[in-house]
Image (cartoon, rainbow, N blue to C red):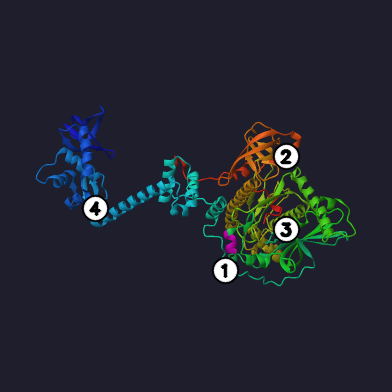
Amino acid sequence: MYILFEDAGKFLAGRILSEAEASMQVELDSGKRVKVKAAQALVRFDKPAPAELLKAGALLATEIDLNLAWEFASEDEFGFADLAREYFDPGQAPSPVQQAGALIALYEAPHYFRRAGKGRFKKAPAEILQQALAAIEKRKQVAALIDHWAGELAAGRCPVPIVEQLYRILFKPDKTSPEYKAVVLAAQQTHKSPLDLLQQAGAIASAYQFHWRRFLFENFPKGTDFPAIQAPAVVQDLPLAQVQAFSIDDSSTTEIDDALSVQGLGSGTVTLGIHIAAPGLAIQADSAVDLIGRARLSTVYMPGHKLTMLPDAVVQAYTLQAGRPCPSVSLYVAFDETTLEVRSSQTRLERVPIAENLRHDQLDGVFNEEFFARPAASEEPAWGAELRFLHRLAKQLKSQREQVRGKPENFSRPDYTFRLDNPAGTEPAGQETVSISVRLRGAPLDLIVAEAMILANKTWGQWLAELGVPGIYRSQASMAPGVKVRMSTRALPHAGLGVPAYAWSTSPLRRYVDLVNQWQIIACAQHGATAALAAPFKPKDTQLLAIISAFDAAYTAYNSYQASIERYWTLRHLKQNSTQQLRATVIKDDLVRADDLPLVLPALGAQGLARGAAVRIKLGEIDEITLHVSASVTEHLDQAAGEPMDEEDFEGGESELAAGPISIAVDVADAQGQPDAAAHTPAPQ
């Protein structure tokens, strides 16, 4: 005697060896003996053999018309043998094979028949059945569509729906979507990576647009347009400052946040004025303009283009444009003209006349190291006397910071400026001619602006702490390897800059944390000792922590994109100039840094060479999508030919390379920080 039974959702059959009241011993065809509860037993039979019964029953189950079986089935609960009798021959008892076929068919059709116990079923209501059948038909159509799309991809053609979902498929996939499944299936069939597959199918028409659209998809899913909005006016009656201020920025800068003034030259006491654009005097926390700034958090810079934090109408209302008095938060610091010791400082809210907007790219050749090294002439260029004092002061301030810092700041690596030939105000297409020029870090005009801004951020950061007004600070516990700059609401030392406290406050038009700190500084200027009660953000305000978290994430993403797109334009520059070889310096392992371009890349043959070793490399294939370029060392140059390298020269090597090869979110298995010191130099705008 044989028995058909169910075990863990599977149907098995075997010979009964012994039987008790509640269970039996059964031997399977494999020879394995199992204990089967009586309740698990479904069909007893003498023939055919167990294996033949299961095979014949499974075949018969595929031939059963489920619609007809559903019609025959009782409205009440029924057993599989009852249905077998009604379906095959109402006048005869069903055979073991017919019973097995009916059992398997019922078990595998839960949309037609619901299980009501061991071997017991109840047919689904007609309405539910129709819904289930419609869903099954839809799944069949989707499966057919996935197969069709996968076939198109394998043939080198990309269906429109996949093109439309390209960035979601690659970077934030919905793994249940048919578009994603089609890419995975095609990747399996062709044995290609998803990115290679999509490239070859024509989904990516432009490497530049690929990087740009990916960035927008991840960071600006609702687009980059601002709502129509007017800039609120400053309602306070601000006094007019008795100074003539000037700014120093790049020619393309539109968000002019800061300007300087110098008073009292030759009098023994010289007063430096640091004047910061004051949108915080007009924009109120939680206003419409504030919500725009809080959503974007920072201006995004890239060669040939930028996305401003605030709408242009708002920027133009508060930017320190020459020829008009501009609302400003001003820090005045009086210095002994000879010793450069600080005698006093104060903060004022006022209108500052901006006499001129100086452009460092036009004046670097005039106000260079040679100019400041020679004695003052009887006829100096405009602003020459002021800039001479400011340069002397900047070197003194830098020296004082370096004493606290413990070692000199290293400016041996250059800054690079990217210029595209696209018309001003238009988005690059990616095919523009790019020129890359070199500027040594710490150039005189940069040094003047950087030290003035560090002085302001340090002074205001300490002032906020003294008055008990919370602010957003940047701090670094030490300069030990791996100790990062962090943002918090605590006024802690910044070891990398050599200052006791540091709060970004000098770029309120392009960084949201600066605008937040400006509101707090304005409260200090207006209310003094009681400022903590009047400031928009109170001590232990959780909003500040939320702003820090959001800003950190956005600023990291924006800087990462800037690095990636600059790498793209660097690779374009290599192609445009048919560059085959470069001089480079070994960083570590197989990584080298090009001496005259902002490019870090792996080079075969660099392993084992000393850090700072000078080499010549031959470039290999360039991939503008993955931003990868291969290279190999062709010549070891004299060690003296390479620039001497300090520990700081190696910082960022890996992160610069990480701006290269992109990360793809498609499951292959399925298919088979910017330093604070640098933040004070003029950003590419």
- Element assignment for label 4: loop
Q: Which residue is mark 1?
A: 228
Label 4, label 3: how far apart the Cα atoms are:
75 Å
Residue 646's disc number: 2
Q: Which residue is mark 4?
A: 124
Q: Which of marks 4 and 1 precedes in the sequence? A: 4
Q: Is residue 568 left or right of residue 74?
A: right
Q: Amino acid at mark 4?
A: Ala
- Element assignment for label 1: loop
Q: Is residue 657 left or right of residue 13?
A: right
**Labelled pair 4, 3 in contact (Cβ < 8 Å):** no
Choose top left, top right, bottom left or bottom right for residue 583.
top right
On the question of residue 597 being in view, the answer is yes
Q: Which of marks 3 and 2 precedes in the sequence? A: 3
Q: Amino acid at mark 1?
A: Ala
Asked whether residue 291 is drawn in magenta, I would say yes
How many labels, in total? Answer: 4
Label 2, label 3: how far apart the Cα atoms are:
29 Å
Q: Amino acid at mark 2?
A: Asp
Quadrant of the drawing holding the C terminus: bottom right
The residue segment tinted magenta is 290-295
- Among all residues in the image, which is located at the extreme top? 31
Picture layout, residue 198 above or below residue 506? above
Label 4, label 2: how far apart the Cα atoms are:
77 Å
Q: State the residue in front, 36 or 70.
A: 70
Pair 4/3: label in front: 3
Label 1, label 4: how far apart the Cα atoms are:
56 Å
Pair 1/4: label in front: 1
Q: Which residue is mark 3?
A: 249
- Element assignment for label 3: strand
Q: Main secondary structure of the magenta part?
A: helix
On the question of residue 299 being in view, the answer is no
